[in-house]
Image (cartoon, rainbow, N blue to C red):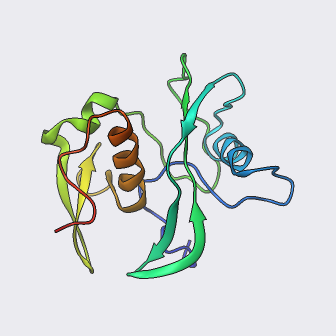
């Protein structure tokens, strides 16, 4: 979407907390169901990662971004995508920590650490999504080999 600075990037399902959402976790569960057709109703909540301050083009934005981690065995092979999502893919956790998948993602603001999860021109996780993965793996005691912010 032309008004969304993150449109077209690899990302987890997400969006804003709606007035009907009692808390950010409910918003995350609703957005996941809406965007990729995945209900987290029977999944085990493992926890919330540290919130991240919103940023774009080197500027701080007036928003806080939250991420929640679930254990959801028996995930469907295919997801049901809504109009906001062009494509989705599954990628093994062990591949995310494999240095062979760690790349530099070029942007107008310089190179950033990224993880190649598919086609090199389309499927590189970087930026906010990379930062959440970094927080997740740090909490497990398996830090990613590239560190944020880039040096």
Residue at the far left: name it.
100
Residue at 65%, 48% (x, y): give it. 82
Nearer to me, 57 or 48:
48
Q: Determine whether 42 is above or below 24 in the image.
A: above
Residue at 58%, 78% (x, y): give it. 3
Spot occupied by residue 15 in the image (x, y as percentages of width and height): 64, 58
Residue at 54%, 17% (x, y): give it. 73
Spot occupied by residue 38 in the image (x, y as percentages of width and height): 63, 33
Q: Determine whether 136 is above or below 46 in the image.
A: below
Q: How many marks?
A: 0
Q: Determine whether 30 is above or below 130 in the image.
A: above
- Horizontal arrangement in the rendering, residue 144 relative to residue 13 (left or right): left
Residue at 60%, 41% (x, y): give it. 36
**Residue 43 falls in which quadrant of the image?**
top right
Nearer to me, 66 or 20:
66
Spot occupied by residue 33 in the image (x, y as percentages of width and height): 68, 40
Residue at the far top: name it.
74
Locate the C terminus by quadrant: bottom left
- Horizontal arrangement in the rendering, residue 115 relative to residue 1 (left or right): left
Locate the N terminus by quadrant: bottom right
Spot occupied by residue 42 in the image (x, y as percentages of width and height): 69, 22
Nearer to me, 150 or 118:
150
Nearer to me, 9 or 83:
9
- Horizontal arrangement in the rendering, residue 24 relative to residue 104 (left or right): right
- Horizontal arrangement in the rendering, residue 100 relative to residue 115 (left or right): left
């Amino acid at each position: 979407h032309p008004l969304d600075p993150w449109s077209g990037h690899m990302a987890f399902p997400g969006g804003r907390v709606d007035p009907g959402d009692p808390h950010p976790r409910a918003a995350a569960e609703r957005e996941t169901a809406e965007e990729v057709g995945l209900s987290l109703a029977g999944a085990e909540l493992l926890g919330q990662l540290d919130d991240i301050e919103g940023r774009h083009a080197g500027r701080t934005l007036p928003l806080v971004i939250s991420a929640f981690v679930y254990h959801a065995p028996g995930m469907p092979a295919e997801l049901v995508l809504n109009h906001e999502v062009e494509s989705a893919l599954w990628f093994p956790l062990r591949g995310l920590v494999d240095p062979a998948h760690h790349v530099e993602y070029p942007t107008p603001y310089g190179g950033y650490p990224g993880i190649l999860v598919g086609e090199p021109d389309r499927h590189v996780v970087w930026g906010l999504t990379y930062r959440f993965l970094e927080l997740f793996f740090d909490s497990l005691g398996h830090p990613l080999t590239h560190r944020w912010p880039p040096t």
